[in-house]
Image (spheres, rainbow, N blue to C red):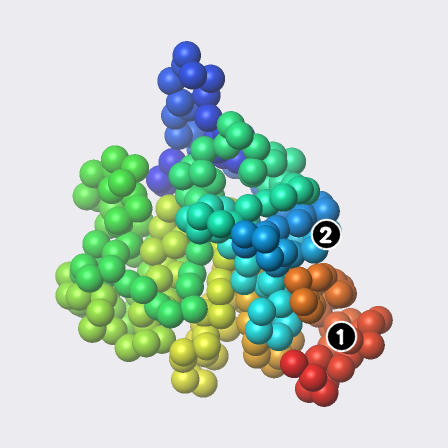
Amino acid sequence: MPATITMDQIKSSPPTANRATLATPPQKSAPAGRTLIDIEKLNFFYGESQALHDINLAIPEKKVTAFIGPSGCGKSTLLRCLNRMNDLIDVARVASGSIKIHDIDIYAPDVDVIELRKRVGMVFQKSNPFPKSIYENITYGLRLQGVADKSRLDEVVERSLRGAALWDEVKDRLHTSGLGLSGGQQQRLCIARAIAVEPEIILMDEPCSALDPIATAKVEELIHELKEKFTIVIVTHNMQQAARCSDRTAFFYLGKLIEYAETQTIFMNPGNPQTEAYVSGRFG
């Protein structure tokens, strides 16, 4: 099994010491459903414009949490905060508050962002396979970590493609370009690439928005299977998809968290009139 990185090791070593080496986390995992990501009083800005207002959110382990809301409400911004992808935008900044994973503040100065992103993988709205073979797409992250043993790489490729429900479709053409796959297959290849490095959390930013209904159904079925091993946070504009896929749903409006509850509650008995109006299609 490939070595993985514990959350403790996203912190950099002191300047006088070498950075911590990769280590396999304890075999016994915590019970599904405990809080894994804890967001407290988060305020986020793009320049002078505030995108997120005082967000408080506890995301459970090994569940699917959906972020819903109209365009521009802050849901994708918050998703990208979870692995600090917003750091790549010059004017983006966390003004106050915290995001903790396993009680580690991921915005603390001593956090190694590269190690963080190994633990928190991401699948984007538009499938983005590398212009390489299917095999090389899957092994790319491992090779960056220095893994060169072919038998180990072969094992990870098969396990990841099986995990993404793609193995039977591509096992005979692993060394052909990933760009030759259909749109739905490319998205599942990107999911396989994400899980190959054994992250703990997978972020999905509208992963089905460019897919047809059949490919969408396959990805949704895959999400159900993946939550046995991973904590998943998904942004979607599709209300039916949120209702089908997620265990908990957070509704955002104008950068504020309006309501957060079990998905069935959000769609069947919301506690806030704005939530009810949005999920029933009366606005947004």
Residue highlighted by disc 1: 275
Does residue 229 appear to the left or right of 210 in the view shown? right
2 vs 1, front mark: 2
Q: Quadrant of the C terminus?
A: bottom right
Disc 1 is placed on an element classified as: helix
Q: Position of residue 95 (x, y in %)?
A: 63, 44
Q: Amino acid at mark 2?
A: Asp
Identify the residue at horizontal 37%, vertical 46% (top origin).
Answer: 197
Residue highlighted by disc 2: 54
Residues 55 and 8: in front is 55
Q: Position of residue 16 (x, y in %)?
A: 41, 12
Residue 69 versus residue 96 in the image, above or below: below
Q: Position of residue 60 (x, y in %)?
A: 66, 52
Q: Residue 210: in sight, yes or no?
A: yes
Identify the residue at horizontal 53%, vertical 35% (top origin).
Answer: 7
Q: Quadrant of the N terminus?
A: top left
Count of numbered circles in the view: 2
Q: Position of residue 62 (x, y in %)?
A: 60, 54
